[in-house]
Image (cartoon, helix red, strand yellow):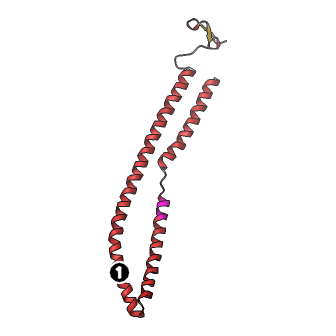
Amino acid sequence: MASSNRLTLDRSSGGAVSPPTTGTERSLGDLFKRLSTDAAELLRQEADLAKFEIRETGATLARDAAKLSVAFAMGLAGVLSFAAFLVVALGDALDNYWLGALLVAVAFLAASGILVKNALDDIKKRGLKPQATISTLKKDVDWVKSEAKELKRELTK
């Protein structure tokens, strides 16, 4: 038989019997150490990616909010002036100013409802989830599974 199947006596460990190893084989402890080191590094990288994505999303939302605030302030002045004009014009046309005011209010409320719905749909479509982090986490799970299979193969040799 080949000599690689023979057990050797390790005198430095108090006489424990261990299988022989070649220079290219790694011990079980080394494999676990490598796996735990790689997994820890992977988790650190995933946390960094998640932080980056959250900061990027927050910055984008802040810029969008600032733009919306300015647009809202400018639009409000114009809408109020236009609403006053419409109330007066409809009041003159109908000889009833309260009815003109009511019609203008209903029209503006309907338009604002449509705008709010569109804005909320856009936010839902864009989403607030860190998509790249989720994707890489799925890949990481696959990597850990393959590493575990490799470790199992090494152990069964």
| In this picture, residue 108 sits left or right of residue 29 | left
The residue shown at (57%, 21%) is: 28
Asked whether 124 falls inside the magenta stretch, the response is yes
Name the residue that disc number 1 marks: 82
How far across and down, in percent of the image, does residue 116 sit? 46, 68
Residue 113, above or below 24:
below
Asked whether 132 falls inside the magenta stretch, the response is no
Q: Residue furthest front?
A: 98
**Viewer-closest of 128 and 29:** 128
How far across and down, in percent of the image, does residue 79 sit? 36, 76
Among the 4 quarters of the image, the one containing residue 66: bottom left
How far across and down, in percent of the image, does residue 134 sit? 51, 46
**Viewer-closest of 79 and 138:** 79
Residue 70, above or below 80:
above
**Residue type pointed to by label 1:** Phe
Among the 4 quarters of the image, the one containing residue 69: bottom left
Q: Residue furthest right?
A: 1
Among the 4 quarters of the image, the one containing residue 145: top right
Magenta range is 120-125
The residue shown at (37%, 64%) is: 68
Few, some or many residues within 10 Å of mark 1 (<14, 14–19, 20+): few
- Label the magenta part by its dominant secondary structure: helix
- Label 1 residue SS: helix
The residue shown at (49%, 60%) is: 125
